[in-house]
Image (spheres, rainbow, N blue to C red):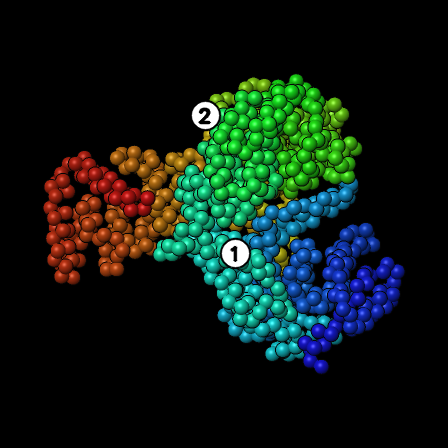
Amino acid sequence: MSAEAADREAATSSRPCTPPQTSWFEFLLEEALLEQHLQKPSPDPPPVQLIVQFLEQASKPSVNEQNQVQPPPDNKRNRILKLLALKVAAHLKWDLDVLEKSLSVPVLNMLLNELLCISKVPPGTKHVDVDLASLPPTTAMAILLYNRWAIRTIVQSSFPVKQVKPGPPQLNVMNQMQQEKELTDNILKVLKEQAADSILVLEGALKLNKDLYVHTIRTLDLLAMEPGMVNGETESSTAGLKISAEEIQCQVCYDLGAIYFQQGSTNAAVHEKAKEMFFKTKELIAKNGSSSLHFTIDEERLAGYCQACGVLTLSSDDTSQQATPYSQIHRCMKSGNYQDIVNIFLEDNLTLSLPVQFRQSVLRELFQKSQQGNDALDEVCFKVCVCNTVCDVLQGRTVDVQFCQLFLKPSKEKIDFLLEVCSKSLHLENASEALKRKMAAFLKNLCLGLEDLQLVFMISSHELFMKLLKDDERKLLIDQMRKRSPRINLCTKPVASFYDIPASASVNIGQLEHQLILSVDPWRIRQILIELHGMTSERQFWTISNKWEVPNVYGNVILGIKDSLTRDLVYILMAKGLHCCAIKDFVHAKQLFAACLELVTEFSPKLRQVMLNEMLLLDIYTHEAGPGASGERPPSDLVSRVRGYLEMRVPDIPLRQVIAEECVAFLLNWCENEYLTMQVPLPLVQTNPYVKLGQLLAATCKELPGPKESRRTAKDLWEVVVQICSVSNQHKRGNDGRVSLIKHRESTLGIMYRSELLSFIKKLREDIVNDIAAEHISIWPSSIPNLQSVDFEAVAVTVKELVSYALTINANNHFWLIIQADIYFATNQYSAALHYYLQAGAVCSDFFNKMVPPDVYTDQVIKRMIKCCSLLNCHTQVAILCQFLREVDYKTAFKALQEQNSHDAMDSYYEYIWDVTILEYLTYLHHKRGETDKRQIAIKAIGQTELNASNPEDVLQLAAQRRKKKFLQAMAKLYF
């Protein structure tokens, strides 16, 4: 029987198999029984969860005799467990659709890494560097499977996911969920960093044009029995499940199309590639059929992709496609012609050609643009929402919650537009009775929802309303409106206390959850939660949005609140407030935090202090983004609160590191150096690394006028930063018994990590950043005692980040511009280096109209500019710059002028040469080469009277200065 036939007959039992806790013998017995089940024909596939159980058991850490946690041992038991997990996946024919639906990202990542390992892919090998054609078939297929999964996972992570509603809160379950989320995020981060390599691997797979094989239960058994054999049998093995080249091409084209489509939002060329991949996928499915042993493709999704690509990649001569509403809307969105979108939607209310999902996606995109600060789109959003709502009404769908929100504050203009849309969307002469009844019911319900009788009269007196409702129906409606008791308008009535709002349950849970997600009004949030808890007591409403994130240090305290309504309310108010802070919506953040503070004050002193800390951080952000940005000093009470926070000694209060970081940066930015150096308590300096770093910075800046003192404090600061950028060495014994020296990732001697240092530096403003850097280079030590422990790569990254940030603060600081130029020079980016050298000279000389100070254009800087020009093959520029040196470098100038392959303007630069010796050499050189025209230009330059050697020195200096100015301005125009 062939390998393929054997694997088609192989099936497994659904019996869960986990290693027992008794003895190794019993475990082996259980494993043998499972092997028997694997060989029995069964119509049911094995449960995918077996993979989870096997891998969890195999990855459990061990504990030694000293109760120290050790990594999972590489023993026979764990190898068998991993092999069993691979067998279950092999039985499922490695169908990623099935595996992805049942396994989490961490588990599937572990499974596919085990597949790579057993398929003889060397660990640490970059897949993009491997030639798939030269590998054994199962090895190539393992690499292909892993990179397909990586791309699919990246694409899937970009889609919104509705969270599963969990049961009652359990802290251990929440911690486990948080750990899995963090692990998934870390894996996604790595996959995204390697996305370009994965795409290259898949693109290379399209060129293979040969069948591959994937591991089966049989080939895995062979590997287990004979671990020395390559790929199960031989290097050219064809054992395993055969996957045809066309099947591989079809799936790879689909996966590449999906990632191209995701990346193509800002690149039309990438959309073209996505279109090509999707249409090729359709061709292969049409040719070979959609059924496959190895994979399935969602043809509905593929059709949607193809339709979207057809809209987004219109050709200029495709007039038929240009006329479609899709393409018109796409062009309007790109050009910002939003009024035309309203007109297209209004016209479509008659034809109903646009799918409701497309209409909703356009409205979502407009809402997003509006929330990003484009206030002019608020009216457009309302109009498009009205068009969508009327379309929903005519097709018998419920009114969307977004319409209800936008209509919370109705006005005459809104009513006028709504009636206009209703009139244009329904031609009464041709409309059916069913459509008329739907429109009449909508207008009637709209009147019942309005409190202002004048607005009701606007609707009831409209021509459309009068035609749709009979006289007695209209009279009955008006009577109902007049008799009803007035309702409380929560949007306009001032609220005296947070607890004075009545709650009313009137809409279903789904609509209320939607409103809860969108609302930033704390009073409305509380009302919605009261209504939801009145409907059901089994739900945890703080989990309905995966965007609501609260730091772990706070989450454990909040989730410990016993009352479920209070727990939901505190969590959501804090999460929304933190989100508003992150997007700089400080007004709503303050409202949410104030409401949360009022709520927790009554029952939790710990949470009260947490909210006071967060409100302090919010006030710092508000000042820095508002009055502080224009140089206005913060109020004294804010400075006092910052000091109070740093000195706070309340036990058991959960603290966020970022608050201490921002408080110290705040004090440094506003020159509170006296407090940081003299008044800050010593225990605080010893326990808080940000306070210690801030004290050293403040002391260095404060004592700069006194060189001796500043050298002492600067040395302390220097030593702290060197420790942060140091690495620690470790010795490791290899398999061969030899001891080798390896570098640890970071030394533990530093007071903080490098990433924390960079984050802190970027919070400091111009006066601090400049005061501790280039202008005072002499205060720093000139040597490092333990040089081999310093991670120079980390130092380089830190300097690059610091200089880039400093230039965003002050782009005209010539010291920083010179350093930026030196960085580019050191990294062989000579054009960029010239740009910054020239910019440094320009900012301190009024664009070279004045002489560049000699401490800016030193001989070292000029020599680096000369080397840049030389390596860019601009040899005439080299000769001219040689004149800028204190002693003219004739050797370099003459050598440069001898070069005939020059990329600059050559003889057009002769007017900038003032050194007669160089001009005479040029005359000789052109005469020797027979270049008469260029020789005449050089002679003309020599003949200028101001260059006559008999002239007074000041005349010669003036001539040189004039030519320097013109040359540097010409260079600036070339490189800026």
Disc 1 to disc 2: CB gap under 8 Å: no
Vertical order, 833 against 149 (above or below): above
Residue drawn at point x = 63 percent, y = 53 percent: 187
Q: Which one is in front, 103 or 620?
A: 103
Q: Earlier in the sequence, mark 1 or mark 2?
A: 1
Q: Quadrant of the N terminus?
A: bottom right
Can the viewer see residue 368?
no
Q: Badge 1 is on which residue?
A: 305
Q: Badge 2 is on which residue?
A: 630
Can the viewer see residue 398?
yes
x, y percentage for residue 118?
A: 67, 68
x, y percentage for residue 845?
A: 30, 35
Q: Amino acid at mark 1?
A: Tyr
Q: Is residue 330 left or right of residue 554?
A: left
Q: Quadrant of the C terminus?
A: top left
Q: Which one is in front, 563 or 298?
A: 298
